Image: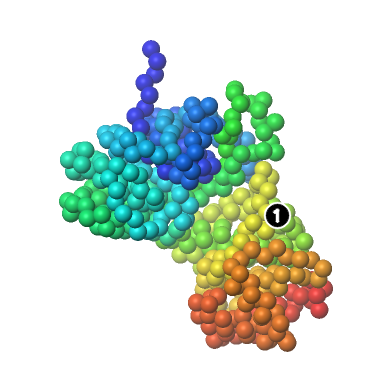
């Protein structure tokens, strides 16, 4: 007797590398451990062209988990067969059919940060709306009508887009569409009371198809796999939800690093300041010294030591989560940076470096000064390196800047200054860059000017 297919309980919006190497992998593990049972219906959001690979492979693929975890080399290949349906959602009848599934409970999305946005559009019954939130509003409207507004038929949304308060924002936009379209007040009330929108934070590097390693891996595959996805061992999912949410989707019981929390903000701060902040602080400092990848940098005797000092002495002490837990997270980050299977280019992280520095690094720099009364040496060196990086050329070396043209023009003007003092003063006082006049911060101008001079001398540029 053939095994019965598990019911489709999750609607996955987005069929890219990340969700396949994150959500689908997690659901596979949870099913295999027997702590939960359910299938996924995946919707391709960024293209109306059917991914023929999904059709050829009957929605099955592998996730290759490769890297270092707690000092041990990890090299695992898992077959994923929990995706039971796949569509581009181009036909309204498909949306209607999905909305009427009585076993559906969850909607998990990764539509990029730009996906959770509001664009005014008219309601046209029988046609699929344009934006992701509008599509979901239409799906909920069909579901509400089909099940007569039954409270138990509400869905729980777990958006994975990397924006703050992603669940709150998605709900707000969907409610706006419901009001724009003059849908019943009872429906609006049903969204508010019967549906849940959880803020979440995801963390896993999923580089995608391992082109350079495919020949080695092919020997371990039972069939050709064009959808093979590589992922690092580290994974983390924080879900801001109540006990009912935790009980309904017990991913943590399968040994996965999933935490159900009452407030996601400290976890976001930890990731942004330590993982993202370390990346952003490292890029210009390491690049100017001839390094090109994260792994090269962390393994470099001097720069690796510099980065560890920056993270553990200047960032970690000012993160609001439990100190021991934060320290462990930072150790994991260092191990992830050294992953021998991932070639993470510094220049790719350098995209929009200025705005990243503002949000990821500056808060740690300010908190350090507030507590210690002096500016942190390594974070200041990173600040100085960012200024030097934005000169666009250091010696004979041209630097591939990738930022808003307005910012590039600003720095071109800054570097026409007659002295380092004038340059630093202009940069710090430019409120468009930092949201405030940093030149007013006690001793910051003098400290940055001094560090910039030393850095240029160390690089042989003076």
Q: How many numbered discs?
A: 1
193 and 265: which is toward the camera: 193
> In the drawing, does residue 253 fall left or right of residue 50?
left
274 and 359: which is toward the camera: 359
Where's the C terminus, which quadrant? bottom right
> In the drawing, does residue 264 fall left or right of residue 223?
left
Residue at (67% x, 87% y) in the render = 422
In the displayed orientation, state which residue is furthest to the top. 1
182 and 329: which is toward the camera: 182
The colour scheme is rainbow
Residue at (63% x, 85% y) in the render = 425
List x then y, in percent, for residue 254: 43, 36
Residue at (35% x, 59% y) in the render = 120
> In the drawing, does residue 68 fall left or right of residue 126?
right
Residue at (35% x, 35% y) in the render = 94
List x then y, in percent, for residue 238: 42, 51
Q: Is residue 137 above or below residue 270?
A: above
The image quarter containing residue 246 is top left
The image quarter containing residue 385 is bottom right
List x then y, in percent, for residue 316: 54, 64
Mark 1 Cα shell of 10 Å, populated few (<14), some (14-19), many (≥20): many
Q: Is residue 92 above or below residue 367?
A: above
Mark 1 falls on what kind of element?
A: loop
428 and 172: which is toward the camera: 172
Q: Residue 282, can we see it?
A: no
List x then y, in percent, for residue 402: 64, 63
Residue wearing tag 1: 293
Q: Residue 212, can we see it?
A: yes
> In the drawing, does residue 220 fall left or right of residue 181?
right
Where's the N terminus, which quadrant? top left
């Amino acid at each position: 007797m053939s095994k019965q297919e598990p019911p489709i309980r999750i609607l996955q919006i987005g069929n890219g590398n990340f969700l396949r190497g994150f959500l689908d992998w997690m659901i596979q593990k949870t099913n295999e451990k027997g702590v939960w049972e359910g299938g996924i219906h995946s919707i391709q959001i960024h293209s109306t062209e059917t991914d023929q690979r999904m059709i050829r492979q009957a929605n099955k693929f592998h996730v290759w988990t490769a890297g270092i975890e707690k000092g041990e080399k990890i090299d695992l290949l898992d077959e994923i067969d929990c995706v039971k349906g796949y569509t581009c959602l181009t036909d309204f009848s498909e949306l209607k059919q999905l909305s009427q599934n009585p076993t559906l409970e969850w909607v998990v999305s990764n539509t990029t940060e730009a996906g959770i946005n509001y664009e005014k559009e008219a309601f046209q019954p029988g046609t699929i709306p344009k934006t992701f939130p509008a599509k979901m509003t239409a799906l909920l409207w069909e579901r509400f009508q089909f099940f007569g507004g039954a409270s138990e038929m509400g869905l729980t949304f777990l958006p994975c887009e990397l924006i703050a308060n992603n669940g709150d924002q998605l709900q707000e936009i969907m409610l706006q569409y419901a009001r724009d379209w003059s849908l019943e007040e009872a429906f609006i009330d049903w969204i508010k009371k019967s549906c849940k929108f959880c803020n979440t934070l995801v963390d896993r590097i999923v580089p995608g198809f391992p082109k350079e390693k495919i020949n080695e891996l092919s020997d371990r595959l039972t069939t050709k796999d064009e959808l093979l996805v590589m992922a690092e061992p580290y994974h983390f999912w924080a879900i801001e939800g109540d006990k009912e949410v935790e009980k309904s989707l017990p991913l943590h019981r399968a040994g996965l690093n999933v935490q159900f929390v009452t407030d996601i903000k400290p976890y976001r701060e930890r990731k942004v300041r330590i993982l993202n902040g370390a990346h952003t602080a490292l890029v210009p400092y390491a690049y100017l010294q001839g390094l090109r990848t994260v792994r090269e940098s962390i393994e470099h005797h001097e720069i690796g030591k510099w980065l560890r000092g920056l993270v553990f002495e200047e960032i970690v002490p000012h993160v609001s989560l439990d100190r021991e837990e934060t320290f462990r997270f930072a150790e994991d980050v260092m191990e992830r940076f050294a992953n021998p299977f991932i070639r993470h280019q510094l220049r790719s992280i350098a995209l929009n470096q200025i705005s990243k520095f503002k949000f990821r690094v500056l808060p740690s720099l300010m908190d350090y000064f507030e507590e210690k009364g002096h500016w942190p040496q390594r974070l200041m060196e990173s600040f100085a390196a960012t200024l030097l990086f934005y000169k666009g050329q250091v010696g004979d070396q041209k630097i591939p800047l990738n930022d808003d043209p307005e910012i590039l023009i600003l720095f071109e003007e800054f570097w026409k200054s007659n002295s380092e003092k004038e340059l630093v003063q202009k940069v710090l006082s430019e409120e468009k860059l930092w949201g405030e006049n940093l030149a007013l911060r006690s001793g910051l101008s003098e400290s940055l000017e001094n560090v910039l001079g030393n850095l240029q001398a160390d690089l042989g540029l003076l």
